[in-house]
Amino acid sequence: MAEQTEKKLIFSGIQPTGVFTLGNYIGAIRNWGPLQDEYRCVYSVVDMHAITVRQDSVKLRQNTLQAYALLMACGIDLEKSLLFIQSHVHTHAELSWILSCNTQFGELSRMTQFKDKSQRHPDDMNAGLFTYPVLMAADILAYNADLVPVGVDQKQHLELARDIAQRFNQRYGDFFTMPEPYIPLVGAKVMSLQDPTKKMSKSDTNPNACILILDDKDTIIRKCKRAVTDSDTVVRYAEGKDGINNLMTIYSSVTGKDFDAIEREFDGQGYDTFKMAVGEAVADHLRPMQETYAKLIGDKKYLNECYTQSDAKALAYSSKIVQKVYHKIGFVDAR
Ligand code: TYM
């Protein structure tokens, strides 16, 4: 990462818990590449976050490399940005401890994602699941990030990161930058294709609910055709038409067309034609990325070189910040 201090710094991360969904892609990842020219960008595959839910260790290792290659295929350019593996950069865990001592139990108890996940995993309500937002705050604050591109479901965690930063600054003197959310206007919450009142998620038990970005064309079209809509027949964006609104959002995100243009395009054509067009547009949009991914994932040596380089730079950068934090809170300086 070049030391161009005039540019603002972006941080974002994604969990390696399987192939990314179209929700991850539209809400977050696809926005990461275009930000690279205007900002200094630091991106991470956050494997430490993933283990808050039990993971098979062989799969986690595969998924981490897969996530890394997918992010590169989605346009993260290592000439411009850092892309590292979270567990390789020990400052995240270290800062997380410091920040957890500046976070209240009550604040963490209010996190809706904790409530959801602990309900879904009643047999494994581990402490990491509870303190997860503190680790996320550490990810961001270890780089003093200005902006954090995420989907809307991460907004509450980001607000907590800001509260923690503000509390730290009040206690120890101004130090952390207040990170701002960077949430897309369209596609910040892509919904399930089977229940469009719920967000699209990898953990959905119904495979038709979710498009994965490595799905082939036939699968994508089939899932779109089966998407739950309503009994109306007109393609228009309106209250009460959650299924169609979601498909319009997806179509708009991959074609760049706005809702008015989409309504005109499908005027008088009915839902089947529209669903088919959505499926085709998504598949065509994803194909070049899928081709790049296929090449990258076969080259483990290259991937290793990429993350090793970024890991080292991320560690060097965040260590400076964490050392200052240690000093501020009163730890004796090392060396
Ligand atoms: P994760 O791995 O669940 O999701 C990665 C990104 O995808 C977005 N996203 C969605 N956007 C729109 N529609 C959806 N259906 C949808 N599903 C997921 C998420 O908002 C996210 O931006 N805690 C984070 C990872 C993280 C992080 C960070 C993010 C760890 N540290 C620091 C930013 C900064 C998470 O679990 O995202």
Image (tube, grey):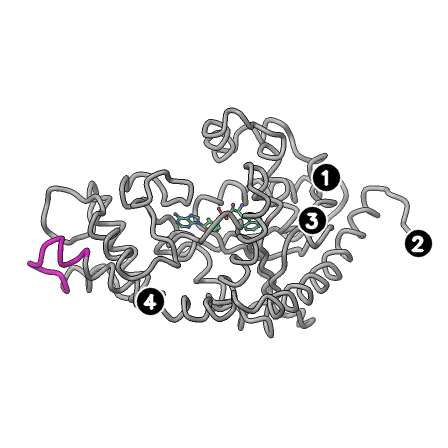
Q: Is residue 249 left or right of residue 14?
A: left
Relative vertical location of residue 134 with respect to residue 148 in this rendering, above or below: above
Return the x and y of residue 18 as percentages of the image width and height. Answer: 47, 50
Residue that mark 4 sits on: 285
Task: Residue at the far top: name it.
Answer: 122
Mark 2 residue crowding within 10 angstroms, few (<14) / some (14–19) / many (20+): few
Indicate the position of residue 273 as horizontal and vertical percent values. Answer: 13, 59
Q: Which mark is drawn over residue 92?
A: 3
Q: Which residue is mark 2?
A: 335
Looking at this view, is 134 or 210 the one in front?
A: 210
Q: CA distance from mark 3 to mark 2?
A: 21 Å
Of pointers 1 and 4, the one earlier in the residue sequence: 1
Labels 1 and 2: the sequence-earlier one:
1
Q: CA distance from mark 3 to mark 4?
A: 35 Å
Instruction: Name the residue tied to disc 1.
Output: 97
Magenta region: 264-275
Q: Could you tell which of marks 3 and 4 lies nearer the N-terminus?
A: 3
Q: Amino acid at mark 1?
A: Trp
